Amino acid sequence: MILFWKRLIVFIGLCVYGFATPSVAQVLKFGLSTAPISLDPRFATDAESSRINQLLYQRLIDFDASSQVVPDLATWEQISPLHYRFQLCACPEKRQFHNGERLTSADVRASYAFVLDKANASPHRGSLALIERIDTPNPDQIDFHLSKADWLFPSRLMLGIVPKTAIDNNLPLHQQAQGSGAFKFVDWVEGGKLTLERQRDGLRVEFISVKDPTVRVLKLLRGELDLIQNNLSSELINWLSEQQGIQQQRQSGQNFMYLGFNLADDATGNLAVRQAVAHAINREEIIRYVLGGAATPASALLSPAHWAGNPELGAYEFNPDKAKALLKTAGFSKEKPLRLSYKSSNNPLSLRHAAVIQHQLKQVGIEVKIRSYDWGTFYADIKAGKFQLFSLSWVGVRNPDIFRYVFHSEAVPPKGANRGRFLDSQTDNLIEAAEQAPSNAERAGLYRDLQARLWQQLPYVPLWYPDNILITRPEIQAYSLSAQGDYTGLLTVEKTESD
């Protein structure tokens, strides 16, 4: 009899657990190579945080496939060169925060006012510094008054809107998001998985950080992950294509891989040294043999297909002899070799790229020591300017305002992302002239000139635009890759029951 009751209790417990926990088909496990740093859009700048915050928060504007700005949470009109009026949409699904509060103009004003306050040290302040005043005459209207005319202004308003009450109460949004996006925050285990829930149907997505790409692939094959996107070696991608039941998607990408310099450093601040490094890197060889052909050589931050891109720029020519000659003019030789420190995250794929570049630079007499760190330490050092060389990528870039954020003299962290301390008055003038140009044709021409200037001054060595690769188990359907490599495919993805 005792055994009977024990079995009955276990049976009831299993039933209760089954009803309380989402079924397998309602939980999708997404493997990440790097964990996000912050779920607060007022501070997040790393790629993973930006991609996930895009799911959690609504923004006033968005971009279409041609990188033109379009309405999202609001439409707008230009009342005068210094006055833009935004009208929030009558869309209840976008205007309710996950905590139940209604999103109003007061929340928009509070979000932007926080970023504009110098005391808060938001890295996004620089791109919004022209905002002089924000008025909210009613719950649906926001009037932005500028200190000077800026045709790019609507496209700058990409900040995720957070509740005014969360700002007033100083809630830790970096760990517990409160947005009004298609997904809501559920849980984030310290150093572990992040769980979001899709609003329309309750599908849960668990973002699980698995740094090692081989382990990530093995977890996918064992069913511990349902999909992984990018950050895989060509060998793993090719091997996966031979595995039964594993699905692949591939699309040309617009994300920008680059090698960054610290221009405040005596060695890397020398243009001849930067040019020598650029001519010593064989991009075609890396793309062919390391990336499996899944990339396109880059010449600038914006791809040539972008309306503000410069298709006339080519990638720096691989020319070892020219690299050696440039090093000689900079005062280096076999007897006095150039020694550089190259900082990288400890992501295996990033380390592999660093090792290949290290080998190529050695062929022209540049001795490189790779220093790898966990992502948090690495990223903090880059923002603080504690490096000579580093490699990173810019993802989801659609707005030419990125040039002010990354290359303007006033955008040195924490005011922006000029992490290499690139201070060039001609670049500043071109950025400002493009922002004030009266026509699209003039703007495009100025942005082409700007990219030519950056190509010549080399605060970055452009490397490549990687293709986007999606690997999924057979139960995963209706996920569409974007050229920016974001995770908007989760808005439509479906997971079916496996056989």
Image (cartoon, rainbow, N blue to C red):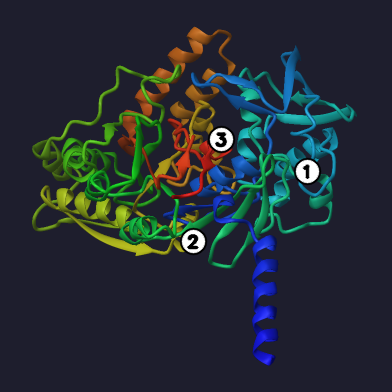
- Secondary structure state at the residue bearing disc 3: loop
x, y (%) of residue 300?
Answer: 36, 29
Residue 82 can be seen, yes or no: no
331 or 13: nearer the viewer = 13
Q: Earlier in the sequence, mark 1 or mark 3?
A: 1
The residues tagged by marks 1 and 3 sit, at their Cα atoms, a distance apart of: 21 Å
Q: Which mark is residue 97?
A: 1
Crowding at mark 2 (Cα within 10 Å: few <14, some 14-19, many 20+): few
Residue at 48 percent across and 32 percent down: it is: 397
Q: Is residue 82 left or right of residue 388?
A: right
Q: In the rendered structure, which amino acid carries the disc numbered 3? A: Thr
Question: What is the total number of numbered labels drawn onto the structure image?
Answer: 3
In the displayed structure, 477 sits above or below 19; it is: above
The residue that disc 2 covers is: 376
Q: In the rendered structure, which amino acid carries the disc numbered 1? A: Phe
x, y (%) of residue 307?
Answer: 45, 16
Q: In the rendered structure, which amino acid carries the disc numbered 2? A: Gly
Residue 413 can be seen, yes or no: yes
Q: Quadrant of the N terminus?
A: bottom right
The residue that disc 3 covers is: 492
Q: Which of marks 2 and 3 is nearer the N terminus?
A: 2
Residue extending farthest bottom: 2
Residue at 50 percent across and 21 percent down: it is: 65
In the displayed structure, 3 sits above or below 470; it is: below
Q: Which mark is in front, 2 or 3?
A: 3
Q: In this view, does 496 lie to the left or right of 97?
A: left
Q: Earlier in the sequence, mark 2 or mark 1?
A: 1
